[in-house]
Each structure stands twice: as C-alpha cells, then as structure tokens.
Image (tube, rainbow, N blue to C red):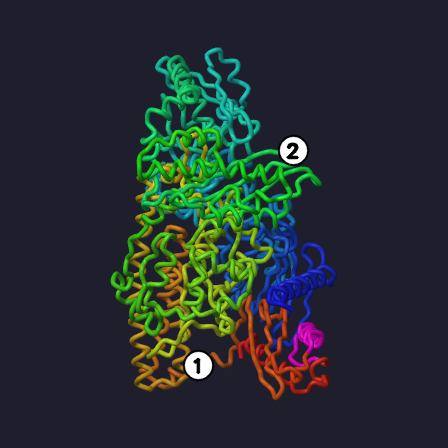
Amino acid sequence: MDYFAKKQWIRIAVCAVLVGAIVLGMTGVFSGTGSLKYDPSAKNLPAGASEAEVTEQGFGGDVTAHVVLNGNTVQELTIDTPNETEGLGKRASDAEFTEQFIGKEGPFTFGENGIEALSGATVTSTAALKAINKAITGEDAAEEPAPEATEEPAAETAAEPAVDDSAITAAEQGFGGDVTVHVTLDGENRIQALTIDTPNETAGLGQRASEAAFTEQFIGKSGPFTYGEDGIDALAGATVTSNAVLKAINSAVPAAEKAEEPAAEATEEPAAEPAAEPAADDNAITAAEQGFGGDVTVHVTLDGENRIQALTIDTPNETAGLGQRASETAFTDQFIGKSGPFTYGENGIDALAGATVTSNAVLKAINSVVPAGEQKEEAAATEEPAPEATAEPAAEETEAPAEKAETNKEAASDGQAYGVYRVTKENTFSKVTVTASAKNGTLTDVKITSEGEEGKDLLTDAIREEWAKAILESGSAAPDAITGATLKFSAGSVQEAMEEILARMNGEAAAAPSEEPAAEEPAAEKTSGNGNDILSAIAVSMGKEKDNSYVTDYLEQDPYLVNIYEGYGFAKDYGSARGHAYTLEDVQKTQRPHAKANCLTCKTPDMHKLIAEQGVSVYSMPFDEMMAQTTNAISCYTCHGADDGNDGKMVVTHQYVNEALGENVSEIKAASLSCGQCHIEYYFTPEDSEAMMPYHSKAEMTPEAILAYYDALGFYDWEQPGTGTKMLKAQHPELETWAYGKHAAMLSCADCHMPVETTESGAQYHDHHLVSPLENETLLAKCASCHGSADNTTALVKGIQEKVTARETDVGNKLSELKDELTAAVTAGAMSEEELDAVRKLHREAQWFFDFCYVENSEGAHNSALAYNCLDTSESKINEAKGLLASAGKSDVTGSAPAAAEEETPKKPPLYAGYRAEKENAFSKVTVIAYAKNGTLTDVKITSEGEEGKDLLTDTIRDEWAKAILESGSAAPDAVTGATLTFSAGSVQEAMTEILDKINGK
C-alpha cells in the first residue's frame, strides 16, 4: 500500500467512525426536541456527580449538550452541533465556548458570570444554553411556553431591557423587518444602557447588531451619532440593519426632544418605497445600465438647480440581499438634495458593500442624467472613441511602432520582456488552441488543447504533450513530431497557430534592442482578442514582484527576539520577506540552517511537482540535491496548477493542504486558500520531515486549538537553552488570522492585495504584483466603500498597526525578562523539576501566543481582535509564570503546592488531538497512531517495520486490532490480548496504554 493509498485509508476510516457515531446518536434513546435523560451509571462518575444529556432545536437541527454535574456545578461539558453552520453555530462544539461553563454553578444567562453567546450564532447559542440549563434544573425554563418563544427563539434574551422603566424604545425598518432599540440615558443624555432586538435580520450579519461588541461602542456617549465618527462603526456586510439601528438610536437621543420623531418618520418612509410610483412624475428622467444580473433602472427628479429631488432605483434582476439593496431608501437617500456628477467615497456617497457591479451601474445611470441636458451629450461623447479606435490602427502601426516597443520595455520593470500568447485554429475535426509563454523572445512553455465532437477529435493527452515538448525543444513551429504526424488536420492547425505565435514573438524581440518597426505586432495583438492581452499583462505584473526587494532586519528592529529565539535559527537571521520572485534566492542566502529539502516547501512549485511523482520522501532529500533540480520561484503553477491559470481556476497544488482539510477545503475561499497554501501555520513531522497542518477544519484554526494539537502530540520545535522550555515556533498564520476576522465573510486575499486593472482593449484582470491596499488607489477606493474615504481607511489601519506594534514591543520585552528569570531559577537549583515544569508550560504558551501575532505580518490589520487577544493572553501567562517564580523563592511549601494540586486534578483533554507511540520488540518496531475528540478515540492505525520473515503482522491483523481498540476504547481488547503474535500484541498494548494515559491527562 503506497503513501497516498494509506492516507486515503485513514480518511475513509475516520469518515466511517464519524458516520457510525452520528447513526448511534440518531438511533439512541435521545430523540425529539427537549429530550432529557439522566444516566449516572453511563460511566464511572465521582461520588455525588450526575450525568445528563439534553437536545434542543438549533438553527439547522438538533443541538445536544452532554453535561456532568456536581450539584448544579458543571464539571464536564460537550456539545454536539452536527447540523449547524460551519464557522458559526458549529463553534458551540469548540472548547472556547464550552469551557466558559466549567466549574460554574447554573442555571446560566448570557452576559452574566462570564458566559457569552457565539457571535453570529444566536439561535445555536440559545439552544445550547437552554439544553445546559435543562440538564441542571431538569425542566424547561419558565418563560418557554410564552408564544413569543415558539415563534422567535433568537429574540428571547432581547426582551429583558423592558424591565428598565426609564428605557426609551424606538423601532425602524431593517433588512428583514423591524429593528428595535431600548435606550437608557443618564442625566446628561449619554447612553447608559442599550439593547437591540433583531429577530428578523440575517443570522451572522444583521443579527450581530444585538451583540455586545456592537452595542458597547455607544455606551457613555451622547448623540446624535454618525458612523465613522467618535468610534462608532457600522456592521460590515449589514448596511441596512446598521442604518436602521442608527436612525432608531438617534430618534431617542436626547429623549425629551426626539421621543415623538420615530412615529412621524415611520409614516413617511413606506409611502416612498414602491419603485413604480416615480412614473407618475412627469419630470422624472429614466436611465438604465447593465448591472450584475440585468438592467438597473434609475428614475431621477431634479429641482431647478439640478439637485436630485427624488430618486428610485429598479433592481429586479440583482441578487437579493446584495444588489437589490440599491432599491432601498438607505441607499437612495444619500443622493437626495445633492448635485452630480457623483463619485463613490465623495460627498457622502457610498457604494453597496458586496455589490460593486450593481453600485457602478447605478452611479453610471444617475450620472448620465445629472444634469439632464448636458450629461446626455457628454455620455454620448465618451462612448464615441471606441469605434474611432478601430479605424486608426493601420496609421498607428506605420507611424509610431517604436512607441509600442518602448511601452513593452517600460512595463517589464525588472528589465525582462515577458509574453504570453494564445492562438486558436479550427479544422474539419476539431478546434485546436496553442498557448505559449516567452521570456526575452525565447519560448519557456507550450501547451496544446483541443475540442471536438466525440469520435472526431483524436488528439490524446500523450500526443498533445509530445507535440508541445517537440515545439519547445526545437523552438520551431514544424518539428519532426508534427510534420511527420498521421493526424494531418490537427498537426496543420498546431503548426499554423505556432507560426503565428512565433511571428509575434520575433517582432517583439526585435523591437526592443534595435527599435526597428515590428509592423505585424500591433495588428496581431488586436486580432488575438482579450485572452492574450490579459495573460501578457499578468506576466508583466508578476515581473514587478522584483520591486518588492526591501528587507527589514527584525532582529535589529526588535532586539528582544534574539533572546527569546535563542537556540533556534531565527535568532541568527530573521528579516521581512521579499517578493515572490526572490523566494529561491533568499532561502539559499539565509543563515538559518536548512539541511533538508523541506525548507523549500513554500519556495518553489518544482518541489510539489516532484512530491506528486515521488511521494513524501522528497521532504527528507538533502537541501542541495533538491536545489539542483529547482529552477522556478513562485509561479503560475503554484496557484493555478498544470494549466497555469489559462482558465482562471484556482488549484491547491500543495498536497498537505488537501490531506489536512479533506472535504473541508470548501470552507475557505479559493482566492484565499491558494495564498494560504504557504501563508499558514504548519510543522514538519519528526518521522519523515513532511509538511503538515495542525488542524483538519476551519473550526480548528484558532491559536488555542492549534496549541492543544501540538500539546497532545508532545511536539516542539526546539528546546531553549538555559530554560529547558520545549518551544513552539509559529510560522506565518495569515490564513488562520484572516479566517476569523470580520473581513473574511466578504473579501478574499486577492480582493485586498491584487487590484483589478484594465488592459488597453478594455479587458479586466487581477494585477499579480501583490501590494498593500494602503499603497494602491484602486484598492483604497474599494475600502472606502465601507470605511468612508481613503484617508479614513488609512488612518484606521495605521492606528491599529501602531497599537499592535507597541503592544508587541511591550509583551516581547516581558517575555525576554521571563526567559532570563527562568534561566536564573534553573541555574540556582532552588526549585523542583515539577515546579520548573509548571513555569515552562506557561513560558511555552506565552511565547506561542506572542509569536502567533508577531509573525503574522499584518500587525493587526487582518484581525485586530485576535491580535489584541493573543498579546493579552501572552502577557497574562507571563505574569502567572513570574508569580510562580516569585512564590517559589519565598517558600518551599507554597512553591510545591501547585504541582501537587495539578497531579490530583486530571487535565481536560483538548477538543481535537492526535497521538503517536512507538514500541520495539524482538521482531519489529510497532507504531500506533490515534486520534481523539474531547478525550474519546475517533481513529486508530497500527503500522510495523521489521526484517523480512520476522515481522509477521499483516494488514489484516493490524486492521483487526485497530478496530478492536477503537470499539472497546481499551488498550487490551480480546483481539489483542488473545493474539498468538505475543510480542507484537504486547508492543501494541504498551503503545496504546501510553496514548490513553496522555488522553486522560496522566
């Protein structure tokens, strides 16, 4: 069984176990909403403890809580969310949510005693809370029978503010229905308390207005409020709900003056909503433009000074919840009373987030009629040059050919001339397309594709590859492989296409050095269509990656790094990354040791082509041996696979990403996952140096879950000299950080770092010269559609980055101090090894959370909340570790007490974990690999190695033993203890016992 077959076997086994678990859950004794069962005999529980399992209806199906109680105090808790939404409701199963209940006495209420609901998952959170409380009390909550609860579960908690007699209530029309605010003011009309009801808004978008993260930004402030001012920000992706909330709050602040306004406004707005009414206005001017799904039509009424007096917009073919929002008053009102022409980001006019095409169509249509008389003529004038351009190329070709060549030279800023050409020729049997890439007039790649009816197109992959190789090696359109081919028609089409490509190449190559006219080149490009324009433009933009050559020496910038990375390569050499064009050059120059080829994992596509052919043994090859086979830095293949992006498709070419995420790959946007193949956290397996990701789904991509994964494996990158701490080194977890940021729902990496540009022929493409959005006007304009303006966006991001950088410096220096203090304690020998290990554990965790933020490179821009949380967590653990060192110095008794307490209290198992144990006997070396969730085995695999004739463990025996261990949850099922292969069975039993001890925290 080869490597990938084994990997597939593991995946099938895991799926089988999961399916079995789901079937058991569905057919067991718990069924129906609100079912409850107490079964203290289900497992060995401590004296006085009881166990309960309760199921409640969540957003997508049943949510089940398994609770172990001591009285009303929760001792253990797991929550099953098989039908909830990935990245939203499913997070109720994560330790980050369940652990907030451990050790606390219920029943519980969100917002009290440190219990918080899941952001964007109100229904699931409510179901989980209800199930936990029912497990504690044994009965439904008193308010459950109320009619409101059965109709609107998500709104239960929002009704509480009504108990405050001084609260002012106001409602406005949101995206799905009424949005109601309850505002309590102090004596100076500042908001003292605020709750917002959003029962009809979209889960994960508008419903976030009910969460404390949104409402707390108003507390202590006086209105009226405006988004983008005084620290008040709208909800990304929920513009209509945000505007409704703001309007309602402003109608209630201050209470005395505005308490009567909502009723008056509410009666005015609905009358203006129907789009059909403006037809009755004889003064209305109508214009239409192509939107995302069809025509977008505007009806504009102007006053005597050409200001917009009334505006309605018809969007019948646009996407509901996105483009159709252009018809809502929240969008149209921003034009009222203003004169055009208009530009997004100016004069208070903002585009719709997530609906760029519709927004642009609306703006174009409005500008075409404002002011009506003049703009119509201007619109016609702007459209005329397009047909004129088609009549002029002949003159341009003869008059200014040198100017064309000069443009090509300028575009390639690295001094090289790049070109990508595509020509299609049809024959009786098929349509043949040849795509060729060139550098400085020399072919670098050729690809041939063909399309035809079944039975007619006889070009096979083997023939196409043979012909392409012959063309590339000969540099000719007519190598022997083609001129001597039996498929005359197809061969003729390939030859014609290649001759046309070579003619263009020769003209291009000659123009640069000699400045002689290349008369055919402009005409050929004009007839080739947008495909060649786009590919050539992309190739040129990739060449500009050479411009990203500046390097910041982080060790010089932040000297504490040398101390905290002591004993590891990053203490010798650590600088900022240059552009993709330098990946191979930089990995060869670095002073960090790189004995093996695995250091090239993210530096060249050649590595992954070889892995696909030879398997994971490539990772262990000597570095220099692999370098000798490597020619390409990051290239088209890295993100687009074998087709090099000719069809625009994104492809995961790094095998470990597919292995780790499996079917969960679809959880990540393709335009982000292609970048995330390299811009992620990963590690190298100790046994074969294979690159591996420490998670299997988006839910496990948090720093807490990744740390738990490494802890369960006993994995560390190096042992720090002086302290003896087994340290982890985070890589560059940009994907993980972005995935839980507020922008992930709307934007991919490409959206923010690869601006959309337009070729001379009008074709659009993503610029492949990767940039910061703060350094590109096109990207800043996109940011401004939500953030108000380019200046606001820049100030916001730089403000975050300055705060995060300052915190990194502060925490980094404290981490360095802890390292010195721990080193001194180890040298002094006054603390026991158990006491030192308690400090080392905190030291390892503190550095992990610090490093996760520091090496992520965005300084908080990708996810400021996570950056602050990581640094706060790191600082907390530093302080705790310093406290242990200080207390140990004062008293041996107090110093040893924490270690004793830890030994008595078993550690809570991580949510997901993998374990490996190896045992040798007289005949073979046996390895057991096991996976667990919440301390329960989910998969077991057994492998063995030994001399031929000695190792008698067959695949059948290994599979049988693994299945028996998994089903029994024991290291010694009958299949193992009763086996005739006593030595091998004993090794399996020992290894599994060791793994189970780790799972149980021993």
From the image, give the main secondary structure of the stretch colored magenta: helix
What amino acid is labelled 2 in the image?
A: Thr
Residue beneath disc 2: 428
Q: Which residues are magenta?
A: 954-973
Q: Which residue is mark 1?
A: 899
On screen, residue 340 versus residue 422, left or right, reads left
Q: Of 105 and 899, which appears nearest the observer?
A: 899
State the image quarter where residue 451 is shown: top right
Residue 684 placement (x, y as % from top left): 47, 68
955 drawn magenta: yes
* Residue 248, image x, y percentages: 45, 36
SS for dot 1: helix
The foreground one among 278 and 378 is 378
Direction from residue 844 to residue 402 in the image, left or right: left
* Amino acid tagged 1: Ala
Mark toward the start of the polypeptide (1 vs 2):
2
From this viewpoint, which residue is outermost toward the bottom?
A: 922
Q: Residue at x 52, y 68 (%)?
A: 617
Q: Is residue 657 above or below residue 571?
A: above
